[in-house]
């Protein structure tokens, strides 16, 4: 047998036919679940489809199948990969998109950048209104997932922020930390705490964890004062006098003669080690961070306590928010009604909440669910404190957090300002007025650059 184009070409053609047949016969699309969900967090994947351990309780997705007949597949997609794939799908108007997606708060701004009518996610206002959830979900928690009053994501969480601290070590130093209601009072008490222990030979004991090269801990302080680097209307707030003063105060906490802070390793194990050894004795804790502390530092049970954040002045909130997740429906979802029913079941149902509690202490955003007895119990780890009730109390004061396409740029600038301001404090210790003036100059220059970037990146509405 001969082939006029030669044996190599014949072999290539045969391989092409075989591969095409394999693709056509593969079970992928034919066996695709009725609803495909992308998640980026392993704990969420376990919550929805279980962790593989033997149990008599069917998983959430199995319970949903029994109720609706709809098969659900949960696909774990790393945040960066999810962003690349999903943005590509939206830009190409792809039809084979996931039916439901979970997005992290640091990623969502890129999806909300186009004009409202061109955003690749489905508006959810009507779903929320007719199902009754609009009035049951904490209103402030819709802010990060909205644009021009249109809601594109259902919040998974609230993430109110508290402080947890080594009560045994502060008690030994004779300091009642919760009695310190303002940040200046708190800093003064922490300086006394450090002096007490240094006089006893403990030289490297710092009061609180605050990052000296990142804005992650500065942002909650700013949110307490109801300031975002860029607000929901696109107004740049970083030149406001309260903003400037907060940056200066923060710098004097991480450097110079009033330094009360040190930086802990990012990994949960490093954080726990600092707590256990007493290197750092107060941590800024959204609800999701509590699980890591308990898991990695079980020996501190009974020695830990929780308190609201101090404030700067009357009118400030005693809390902030750190982190966040939403569920949304891509516009090209084939069955939006079924996708919505799934979101309701995973996020709002009693079954969904019970599954959530198995894997995390994250407070749900549905106000009516906070009366559940499960949130009224004392926590032995915190000496019997009702920490869930404290989180609920703080959630009621939650300031709105806004995320815009330029927010990540602003946060990067703020990280640089913290480094520069800390250096300034070391070189000019005690000169608060000069520090404020320098911070004002830096932030004014940053605001000018942000305005240029925002204008350049605007779409025509």
Image (cartoon, rainbow, N blue to C red):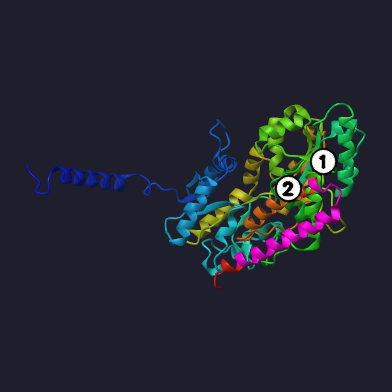
How far across and how far down the image is residue 136, in percent? 70, 57
- Residue pictured at 54% horizontal, 62% vertical: 122
Quadrant location, the N terminus: top left
- Residue pictured at 63% horizontal, 55% vertical: 408
Could you tell me which secondary element the residue under label 2 belongs to?
Answer: loop
* Distance (Cα) linking label 1 and label 2: 14 Å
How far across and how far down the image is residue 250, in percent? 79, 49
The residue that label 1 is drawn on is 260
Residue 133 visible, this orientation: no
* Image: magenta residue range: 427-454
- Nearer to me, 206 or 144: 206
Q: State which quadrant residue 301 falls in.
A: top right
Q: Give the class, few, some or many, for how many residues have Cα within 10 Å of label 2's Cα (few <14, many ≥20).
A: some
The residue that label 2 is drawn on is 217
Q: Main secondary structure of the magenta part?
A: helix
Q: Is residue 437 magenta?
A: yes
- Nearer to me, 299 or 445: 445
């Amino acid at each position: 047998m001969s082939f006029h184009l030669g044996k190599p070409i014949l072999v290539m053609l045969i391989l092409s036919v075989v591969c095409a047949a394999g693709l056509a016969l593969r079970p992928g699309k034919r066996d695709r679940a009725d609803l495909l969900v992308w998640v980026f967090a392993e704990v969420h994947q376990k919550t929805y489809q279980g962790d593989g351990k033997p149990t008599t309780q069917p998983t959430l997705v199995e319970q949903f199948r029994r109720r609706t007949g709809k098969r659900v597949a949960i696909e774990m997609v790393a945040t960066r990969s999810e962003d690349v794939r999903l943005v590509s799908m939206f830009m190409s108007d792809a039809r084979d998109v996931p039916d439901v997606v979970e997005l992290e708060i640091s990623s969502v701004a890129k999806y909300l950048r186009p004009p409202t009518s061109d955003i690749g996610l489905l508006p959810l206002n009507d779903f929320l209104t007719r199902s009754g959830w609009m009035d049951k979900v904490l209103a402030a928690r819709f802010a990060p997932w909205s644009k021009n009053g249109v809601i594109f994501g259902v919040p998974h969480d609230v993430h109110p922020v508290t402080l947890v601290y080594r009560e045994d070590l502060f008690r030994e130093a004779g300091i009642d930390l919760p009695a310190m209601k303002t940040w200046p009072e708190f800093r003064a008490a922490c300086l006394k705490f450090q002096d007490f222990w240094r006089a006893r030979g403990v030289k490297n004991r710092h009061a609180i964890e605050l990052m000296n090269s990142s804005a992650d801990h500065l942002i909650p302080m700013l949110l307490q004062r109801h300031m975002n680097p860029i607000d929901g209307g696109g107004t740049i707030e970083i030149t406001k006098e309260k903003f400037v003063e907060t940056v200066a105060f923060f710098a004097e906490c991480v450097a110079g003669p009033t330094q009360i802070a040190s930086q802990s390793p990012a990994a949960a194990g490093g954080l726990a080690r600092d707590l256990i050894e007493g290197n750092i004795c107060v941590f800024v804790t959204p609800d999701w961070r509590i699980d890591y502390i308990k898991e990695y530092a079980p020996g501190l049970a009974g020695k830990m306590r929780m308190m609201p954040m101090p404030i700067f002045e009357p009118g400030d909130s005693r809390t902030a928010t750190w982190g966040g997740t939403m569920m949304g429906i891509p516009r090209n979802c084939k069955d939006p009604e079924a996708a919505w029913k799934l979101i309701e079941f995973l996020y709002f149902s009693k079954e969904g909440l019970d599954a959530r509690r198995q894997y995390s202490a994250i407070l749900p955003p549905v106000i009516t669910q906070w009366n559940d007895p499960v949130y009224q119990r004392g926590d032995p780890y915190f000496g019997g404190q009702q920490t869930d009730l404290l989180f609920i109390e703080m959630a009621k004061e939650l300031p709105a957090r806004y995320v815009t396409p330029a927010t990540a740029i602003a946060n990067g600038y703020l990280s640089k300002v913290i480094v520069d301001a800390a250096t300034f404090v070391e070189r000019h210790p005690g000169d608060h007025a000069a520090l404020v003036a320098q911070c004002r100059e830096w932030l004014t220059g940053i605001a000018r650059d942000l305005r240029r970037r925002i204008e350049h990146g605007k779409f025509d509405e």
